[in-house]
Image: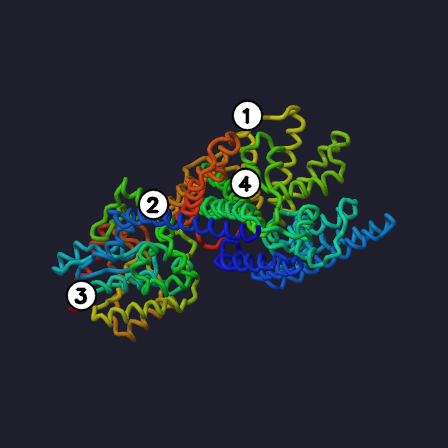
Amino acid sequence: MLFNSIDFLFFLPIVFLLYWMLSQKLKAQNILLLISSYIFYGWWDYRFLSLIMLSTVVDYFVGLKLYKSGSKSNRKRWLIVSLLFNIGLLSFFKYYNFFIESWIESLTLIGYSVENTWTLQVILPVGISFYTFQTLSYSIDIYKGKLSPTKNFIGFAAFVSFFPQLVAGPIERASNLLPQILNAREYTYKAISSGIKLMIWGFFLKLVVADRAAIYVNAVYNNIENHDGLSFIAATLLFAFQIYGDFAGYSLIAIGVAKMFGLNLMTNFNRPYFSPSISEFWNRWHISLSTWFKDYVYIPLGGNRSKKWRWLFNLFITFLISGLWHGANWTFVIWGALNGIYLIFEALLFKNKRTGIINIILTFILINFAWIFFRANSLEEASYIINKIFTSPGNLYIGAGDDITASIYAAIAIGILLIVEFKKEFFNSLFSISKNKYEIIRLIGYSFVVFLILYLGVFGESQFIYFQF
Amino acid sequence: MRKAELKLTAIKVLKFVIILLIVDFCLGSISKEIFLNQKTGKFHRSTYSIYEAKEDILIFGSSHAHRHYVPEVIEKKLSKTCYNAGAEGQQLLFHTVLQKMILKRTLPKLIILNIDENFLYKTDAAYNRLNDLNPYYQDFKDELRPLFSLNSSLVDFKLFFKSYQTNSTLIHALKYYLSPQIDYKGYRPLNGKMTQNKAMIYKKNHSEKEFIEIIDYTFKNALIDFISNAKKNNVKLIFVTSPNLIERNISKNESFQMIKEIAKLEEISFFNFLNSPTYLNQYDLFHDPTHLNDDGARVFSKSVADIINSIN
């Protein structure tokens, strides 16, 4: 089920009302959360519910076994079970065909002709990258002694499948979300109000910013042979806001919905395009994933507490894997590698913390350059686009027919977004709508945002980009 | 404590809904006024067709109607008033409902439906572009609801909001306010002449088809509906196919053959100019391979007027 669908418009209030009607009965509330999460997921394809259930069962028992096992070797064995299962699941559904095709291509390159009979018709289950990482972190944290497992199976299953964040994050840690699910939640107006406000802004980001920008981006990136450098620059800039609006919008809606159920999810985006350095950008972009990779890949590799070359290697490898996590395509691998290289250069060239508008712009340009690989359909297309940008600026495509007005609406939406974020970033104590002491200002302010959504939004029930990861 | 919180939530939500409805009503009404008062542009033309047109002859169809029928020429030849209600990029679903909305108010003497040979082939564009009719929903619910329901659920709920009715129309209105898009009773001439070289470039850049060559029976029903609306209101209807620069083999075009069969069955006169020798390879008469320029449109309009004369 999509947040931006009519189905969700009915689903949410029904689950919300039932949930708070059961507020004195924690177990019943968690059963309701679990059932509604499975309905939410099954709306897309009920067959893949079995994978979530399997992942839940495996990590539930692995967690208990890990805790009970006395010897280190036994604990390690159980951890390997969890790692093999979750990574195996992810590898099969997401990377099997990619690795087979890449292997055949590399054999062809060195002169061997191999017939491709191994690839399979596999559908990528929505959200698999998210919930496998969530369950993996549960087992790893128990293995490291940072967390005690729960015996409450329903509570654990509700944690794994909690519908607001099930398919596109934030990737929650058991240490944050699980205790909230296992303990009674209190109904407060403040939480409901805060949740609704986050949802409204999230829908603005998705329906107005992302989906408006997508019209121009798709027109250019899906038709590259008819465009020149200037159009690619414009499309890439718009893509930066498309993906931000899409993903940050989803996260805000997820956090907002969770708040309505009395549960707090972690912040996933913190105005990333105002980062003065690449390292700062990664502290502000998809925070739940960045910290996951930091805790479970970068630090176990040695982090920065090793020789300099090893530290830089750790950085690079972490980003390379992060790129691959995003998608089974070499474009994502290069995107990840590029970010790793940026960070290595940053670590080598700058000793002090970078600040100021020039650094913000420079970081934004570098991030945008990397987005070319993220959005391009193949490496060939990415190199064609980069080549065009540097050698053939040509004419700026402004859209045909109604696309022209779509580009203008995208620019207006991005303008509003930048004003709001600029104010929050640099003048946070100044006038605020959400925290205004006058209720009427708050009500009119949020009503106006809803008006903007209804008036400027794209209502085609489009997918969220991160569903494909 | 919990009761107090629930009461507080209910009051606050109610306040928010009231303010939201007021904001939506005020800003949505302003937006609708701006929309309906446009003096030029595609929305002006559909508004005029729906609320004001009283001409004797009305022309329906896509860009091939909009760009090919010169009302001035037809009026002079036939001494009857004429308006071109053709809408660029639109398909049968749009034309059928537009006809219904117009016939509810006025009955022309003749309707010309310009037929595109691929009218019955599946295309998402036919559904997606129906949004252009959202602003008229409040006045034409019975006509528009069945159509909008084809592509969307909870139509009444969504279109309850005034701001959604005129979703993303403001820039369009401002654009044509600042730079009016002149039309001549719905007709907009295309200038420039075709050359062989231009035709080749055009072919290369327009190789992608907007449709799938499978019959969409919703479109077929819309065509039958178009015919029965005209018959029910005793309005004479003819089908015309516009000329093309390059000869086309339409014998295997299932959509076109089905339209011909329907016309025959329903006894609708069908005038096919698609491969007419008068226009084939006449580069001077075309703006692009499928659209006549102003010179071509005037020649074609004269031919259509002659046909109308001959059948009366």
Q: Could you give the CA–CA distance between mark 3 and mark 2, rounded to whole angstroms?
A: 35 Å
Residues at marks 3 and 2 on the same chain: yes
Of badges 3 and 2, the one in the foreground is 2
> Distance of mark 4 from mark 3, alpha carbons?
58 Å
Check chain identity for marks 2 and 4: say if they share one.
no
Question: Does label 3 lie on the same chain as label 1?
Answer: no
Residue B152 location (% of width, % of height): 43, 60
Answer few, some or many: residues within 10 Å of disc 4's Cα (few below 14, many 20 plus, some between 14 and 19): many
Distance of label 1 from label 4 (alpha carbons): 25 Å
Number of the front mark, 4 or 3: 3
Number of marks in picture: 4
Q: Work out which residue is located at the far right of the displayed protein and give it.
A: A71
Quarter of image, res B226? bottom left
In the picture, the disc for residue B170 is 2
Find residue B228 and report its image quarter. bottom left
From mark 1 to mark 3, how far is it between C-alphas? 71 Å
Residue A418 appears in the figure: no
Along the line of sight, the residue nearer the viewer: B298 or A261: A261
Disc 2 vs disc 1: Cβ atoms closer than 8 Å?
no
Please give the label number shown on residue A356: 1
Q: Residues within 10 Å of mark 3 (few under 14, many from 20)?
A: some
Q: Residue B258 placed where, x, y %?
A: 35, 70
Disc 1 is attached to a residue of which chain? A
Tell me whether marks 4 and 3 sit on the same chain: no
Q: Residues within 10 Å of mark 1 (few under 14, many from 20)?
A: few
Relative placement, left or right, of A435 versus A298 is left
Residue A372, labelled with which disc?
4
Label 2's element? helix
- Determine whether the residue tagged by mark 4 lies in a helix, strand or loop: helix
